[in-house]
Amino acid sequence: MSLPLDVALRQCERHVSIMKDAMHEMPALLTTELLSQPTSGLTRVLDQFVLRFTKLQDTMGTHVLRQFAAQVLAEQVEDVAFIEVLGLLERHGYLTMRDWALQRVTRNALTHEYPEDAERQAMALSAARECAYQLIEWLTKIQKRTNAQTL
């Protein structure tokens, strides 16, 4: 069952807020050396970032995008495949299907921990940081349109 759009957007806002806090505490450069023997503080910050990044992406995919297309854009998407929803959102300029696919690849790389492979961790976390900015941008566009619709 999907959440109401306003509730889902508030959840996304919370994920963004906590994720941004974690991003501000993360080192600017995530190196193999740093991740080979991370401090407990770094581990905590990275765990928080990963958790909120995945939750944000999951909430957007499960509860926001289809409902936004249906309720705000007034498109008939209730019974179409998710890929069609993405295509519609791309045509409206909210995201691109290619970038959504890259987001999912990045998310999947994060969820497969490689404790013995600091290089792989560094690459996945660095990619996720860039993807996080994109997720925030997409969410901001969706929120602006949603808020404009309800005024």
Image (spheres, rainbow, N blue to C red):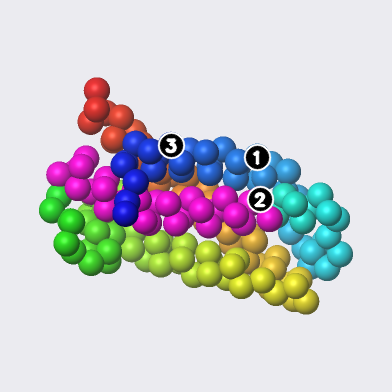
Helix, strand or loop status at disc 1: helix
Please name the residue shown 32% across and 51% down the image: 2
On screen, residue 98 above or below 93: below
Instruction: Tell whether 102 sits left or right of 126.
Output: left
Q: Is 80 covered by the magenta stretch?
A: no
Tags 1 and 2 in contact by the CB under 8 Å rule? yes
Q: Which mark is residue 10?
A: 3
Mark 1 highlights which residue? Answer: 21
* Residue farthest front in this picture: 1
Q: CA distance from mark 3 to mark 2?
A: 18 Å
Q: Which mark is residue 48?
A: 2
Please name the residue shown 42% across and 52% down the image: 59
Helix, strand or loop status at disc 2: helix
What percent of the width, then of the height, locates residue 125?
Answer: 65, 61
Q: Which range is magenta? A: 47-74
Please name the residue shown 33% across and 63% down the image: 97
What percent of the width, then of the height, locates residue 63?
Answer: 35, 51
Q: Which mark is residue 34?
A: none
Tags 3 and 2 in contact by the CB under 8 Å rule? no
Q: Is 64 covered by the magenta stretch?
A: yes
For the C terminus, the image quarter is: top left
Q: CA distance from mark 3 to mark 1?
A: 17 Å
Main SS, magenta region, reads helix
Foreground mark, 3 or 1?
A: 3
